[in-house]
Amino acid sequence: MNMPLKQPKPLFLNDANLCLATDLYQLTMIAGYFECGKNHKSTFELFVRNLPEKRTYLIAAGLEQAIYYLRKLRFTGEYLKYLRDLPVFKDVSRGFFDHLRNFRFSGDVYAVPEGTVIFANEPIIRITAPLIEAQIIETYLLSMINYQTLIASKASRVVHAAGGREVIDFGTRRAHGPQAGVLAARACFIGGCAGTSNVLAAYELGIPSIGTVAHSWVMAYDDEYESYEDFHKVFPDNTILLIDTYDTITGAELATRIGKKLKGVRLDSGNITLLSKKVRKILDDAGLGHVKITASGDLNEYKISRMLDKGACIDSFGVGTEMVTSKDIPALGGVYKLVEQEKEGRSMPKMKFSKDKSTCPAKKQVYRFLNNKGIFKKDIIGLIDEVFDAKALLLPVMKKGKLLHKIPTVQQIQKTARKNISQLPDRFKALNCKTAYPVAISKKLRQVRDKTIRNTGITGRDKKRNKDFVL
């Protein structure tokens, strides 16, 4: 007898299964903490140790989704039963799973607003909560913040290279799955893109949805001009034609027959710089100077910069693979580290001494100094109670698990990013900048660090090695 085929499940996150969107070791750790009676108030900070190669700054992104996760995280039903039945938990008490069933995030969150320019070792998010709560959220926060920050930063570079010309996210088909495509569209918009080809992202975020036609539209017709004409009939006020399916010059000449209603043409292959000049002349000679030329096809910030340096006649760029995967730097090494605990009414700074992975203890704040023209001058990472004539970047977002203020829209976040980029000195926006923005740690924070080293009983040899952590 044939058994019915098991129906496959779509692997999409939802509010119910968020509790499993973590690494197993987070769950084994919190089980261990529970069984050993360790759940004192703890502070973790999320930051990037080193900027990726060829990056001089990052654009913070992903906080909205991180906050949503903290507010919605629950352990219920089949997911709780699944965890209870895992062999690794066979000796864990029932009380632990009762604790999970009643789980609610009750901590405090300080964060750098999305769209803010940040640098290495600067805390992006600071979490203070009971140890079990602060630990379990590590994986999700890192995944969300690392990815969106990476893509927003890449998009910012692409937008800067475009020199004021529109950049459109065309990358969903090359993103690492449909969910990544939506998050990438959001991050690209924060980074300065004008719109996205991703319809779901456009709908959910209220950003422009932009698209034209594929080569298959032209190929589906026996006559190239007939394909243009039919598209114009259906979309008379939004006729943007892809003209390089066969011969670009011929395609451009045929496109001019559409007349004054033609809105734009797209070039997707070949020597786009040279072709754009020829196409521009064809359009201008036909009295179609208003028609815009869009370029696409495996573009990145370096290609765009070279094209424009050579006089390419491009009005906008559709950028996909290279932007939504940050192809040259495909991962961001953000980390989430314990920096302080409260025991018996005392604050106890915590730090890691591992070679090349040492951390700085205590709750920290980032202080940004501006010159008299409002341009970024330097940053100091200090203790949370220090006073400087500077802007404190980490702001309160949640208190005792409650949201303190309305989350900004992605349009507002884009404006924040645009302002931050305008305040960043020009030399740090250069694609091949080799100079690091000045970031230091305060004298008081150094003193706390040195005292923590002494109190931890680190050996003389390891103490010398720990001088790795110098900003």
Image (cartoon, rainbow, N blue to C red):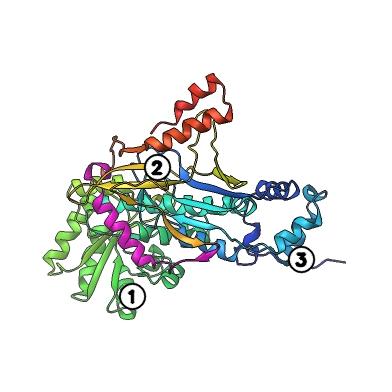
Residue at the spot 49% in from the left edge and 66% down from the top edge: 403
Mark 3, secondary structure of its residue: loop
- Residue that lies at the very extreme toward the right in this rendered image: 1
- Reply above or below: 446 against 165: above
Q: Position of residue 143 (x, y in %)?
A: 53, 52
| Magenta segment | 401-429
Residue at the spot 22% in from the left edge and 57% down from the top edge: 164
Q: Position of residue 431 (x, y in %)?
A: 28, 42
* Left or right: 228 in relation to 78: left
Q: CA distance from mark 3 to mark 1?
A: 43 Å
Residue located beneath label 1 in the image? 231
* Left or right: 160 in relation to 97: left
> Comparing marks 3 and 1, which lies closer to the viewer?
3
Q: Earlier in the sequence, mark 3 or mark 1?
A: 3
Considering the whole magenta stretch, tell me its main secondary structure. Answer: helix
Q: Position of residue 422 (x, y in %)?
A: 24, 53
Mark 2, secondary structure of its residue: strand
Residue located beneath label 3 in the image? 5
Mark 1, secondary structure of its residue: helix
Do we see residue 328 in this rendering? no
- Reply above or below: 239 against 62: below
Residue at the spot 42% in from the left edge and 62% down from the top edge: 186
